[in-house]
Image: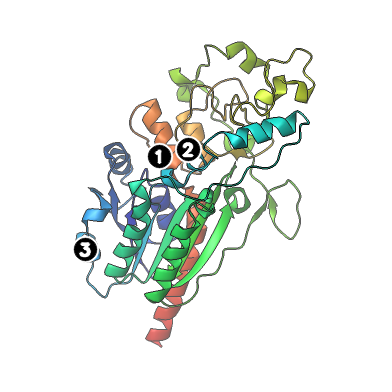
C-alpha cells in the first residue's frame, strides 16, 4: 500500500528521503529556505514530489492536500521537523555563565554549589511553529504524523511545548508515542540524539527496536555501532577534496597536536600535558574536536565556528560528502550552495536511516487499519 506523505519544514530532505525509504509516497515538500529548495529539486530522482517554497504558517491543511493532489479521503501522513534553533542547547545554557563557572571549578577540584536551572524560555517567534505543524495535521485530517526535533526540546525551558503538542494531538483523536532516539543505536554512524513524536488515528505507533549498541559489544542480538571509519571509507580521495577543508590560522599548531577522538582538553593539565595550552572546561567541548575512526561521529553541527568540530582525524575539516555519509545520505545526493550553506543544511537534517525506521512504525498502524477495513 502506498501512503501519501507531505513534508513540512523539509530542509535538505533528510526526513523526506527517510520517508521514501520506508515506502511512503512523497507528494509535496514545503520549505521556506530557497537554497534548501534548490537542493530538493536537484535530487528529483531521490526526492520525488513537488517542492513548494513557502511559509508553512500561511497554508491550511486543506490547501496542502490540494497542492499534493490528494482528495479529503486519501490516506495521508504529514511529517516534519520545525526549526530547532529555539530549543537547541545554545538557547538554554544558564545565561549569566554560572554553568561554565561550575564546570570549570569541578575540573580544577573546587567545590561550588550547582547553579539553578533557568526554566523560562527565551522569546523566539519560531517556537510557535510546533503548534502550526500540529494545526496543519489536524486541518488536513491526516491519518498519521511524524514530528522530529532536538533532544533539548525536553529541557525544562521547552517541555511545555512538547506536552501541549501531545495533549492537543490526543484530544483530536491521535494516539501518540514519544521517543528519545540515539541515532547510533539505529545504525547511523553518529551519536546524534533526537526526539520523535509519532502519531496515528488508528493505533499507538510502536517504538522501533534498536538495531545497534552504542558500544562495540555484541549482545542481545544487536550489532556493534557503525564507526566513522567505516562510514567514511573510500571518501579520502582527491575527487571529493574541497578547498575549505584545509585548517589554518590561530590554533593550527595546537590543532595538529590533538590525537583522534580528543578535543582541546588533550592540551591541558587535566590530560597530563607537560606544557598546557588550555585549561579544562574553559572551552565548549567541540573546540578542536577530532573524530576517531574507531567510534561513531559526534553530532554534525549546523553552525560551526572555524575551530568547532568534529574535524577529520587526518587534521582537516570534513568534506560535504563525508558529512552526508555520517548523516546516511546516499553518495550521489547533491547539496547546493556555499560551504556554509551546505554545512547548515547537513547539520539541520535528520538522518534518513533513522527517520525510515520511525516512519515504518507510523505506516504500520495505517496499513493494519486499511487491511481491517478491506476485510
Please state the horizontal and vertical placement of residue 341, each as a whole percent of the image.
37, 31
How far, Cα to Cα, is label 2 from label 1?
A: 8 Å
Viewport quadrant of the C terminus: bottom left
The colour scheme of the drawn protein is rainbow
Label at residue 324: 2
Residue nearest the viewer, comparing 159 with 207: 159
Closer to viewer: mark 2 or mark 1: 2
Q: Secondary structure at mark 1?
A: loop
Residue at (47%, 50%) from the top-left corner?
120
Tell me: residue 115, above or below residue 362.
above
Viewport quadrant of the N terminus: bottom left
Q: Which residue is mark 3?
A: 69
How far, Cα to Cα, is label 1 from label 3?
A: 26 Å
Q: Are marks 2 and 1 in contact (CB under 8 Å)?
A: yes
Residue nearest the viewer, comparing 353 with 289: 289
Mark with earlier residue (1, 3): 3
Tell me: residue 60, above or below residue 38.
below
Q: Are marks 1 and 3 in contact (CB under 8 Å)?
A: no
Mark with earlier residue (2, 3): 3
Mark with earlier residue (2, 1): 2
Q: Which residue is mark 1?
A: 333
Crowdedness near tag 1: few (<14), some (14–19) or many (≥20) residues, C-alpha within 10 Å: some
Amino acid at each position: 500500500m502506498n501512503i501519501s506523505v507531505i513534508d513540512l519544514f523539509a530542509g535538505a530532505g533528510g526526513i523526506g528521503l527517510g520517508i521514501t525509504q520506508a515506502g511512503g509516497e512523497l507528494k509535496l515538500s514545503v520549505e521556506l529556505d530557497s537554497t534548501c529548495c534548490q537542493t530538493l529539486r536537484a535530487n528529483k530522482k531521490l526526492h520525488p514530489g513537488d517542492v513548494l517554497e513557502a511559509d508553512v504558517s500561511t497554508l491550511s491543511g486543506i490547501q496542502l492536500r490540494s497542492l499534493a493532489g490528494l482528495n479529503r479521503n486519501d490516506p495521508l501522513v504529514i511529517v516534519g521537523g520545525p526549526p530547532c534553533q529555539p530549543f537547541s542547547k545554545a538557547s538554554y545554557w544558564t545565561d549569566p555563565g554560572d554553568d561554565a563557572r561550575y564546570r570549570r571549578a569541578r575540573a580544577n577540584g573546587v567545590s561550588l554549589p550547582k547553579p539553578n536551572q533557568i526554566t523560562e524560555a527565551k522569546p523566539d517567534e519560531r517556537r510557535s511553529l510546533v503548534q502550526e505543524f500540529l494545526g496543519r495535521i489536524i486541518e488536513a485530517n491526516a491519518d498519521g504524523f511524524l514530528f522530529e526535533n532536538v533532544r533539548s526540546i525536553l529541557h525544562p525551558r521547552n517541555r511545555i511545548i512538547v506536552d501541549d503538542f501531545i495533549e492537543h494531538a490526543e484530544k483530536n483523536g491521535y494516539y501518540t508515542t514519544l521517543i528519545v532516539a540515539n541515532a547510533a543505536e539505529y545504525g547511523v554512524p553518529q551519536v546524534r540524539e533526537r526526539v520523535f513524536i509519532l502519531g496515528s488515528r488508528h493505533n499507538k505507533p510502536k517504538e522501533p527496536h534498536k538495531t545497534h549498541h552504542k558500544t562495540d559489544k555484541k549482545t542481545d542480538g544487536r550489532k556493534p555501532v557503525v564507526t566513522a571509519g567505516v562510514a567514511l571509507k573510500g571518501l579520502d580521495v582527491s575527487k571529493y577534496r574541497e578547498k575549505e577543508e584545509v585548517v589554518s590560522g590561530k590554533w593550527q599548531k595546537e590543532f595538529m597536536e590533538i590525537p583522534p577522538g580528543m578535543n582541546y582538553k588533550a592540551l591541558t593539565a587535566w590530560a597530563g600535558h607537560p606544557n598546557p595550552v588550555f585549561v579544562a572546561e574553559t572551552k565548549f567541548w567541540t573546540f578542536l574536536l577530532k573524530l576517531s575512526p574507531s567510534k561513531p561521529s559526534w553530532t554534525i553541527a549546523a553552525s560551526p565556528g572555524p575551530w568547532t568540530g568534529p574535524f577529520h582525524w587526518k587534521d582537516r575539516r570534513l568534506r560535504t560528502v563525508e558529512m552526508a555519509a555520517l548523516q546516511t545520505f546516499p553518495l550521489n545526493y547533491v547539496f547546493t550552495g556555499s560551504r556554509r550553506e551546505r554545512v547548515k543544511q547537513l547539520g539541520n537534517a535528520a538522518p534518513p536511516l533513522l527517520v525510515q525506521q520511525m516512519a515504518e512504525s507510523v505506516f504500520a498502524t495505517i496499513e493494519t487499519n486499511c487491511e481491517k477495513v478491506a476485510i
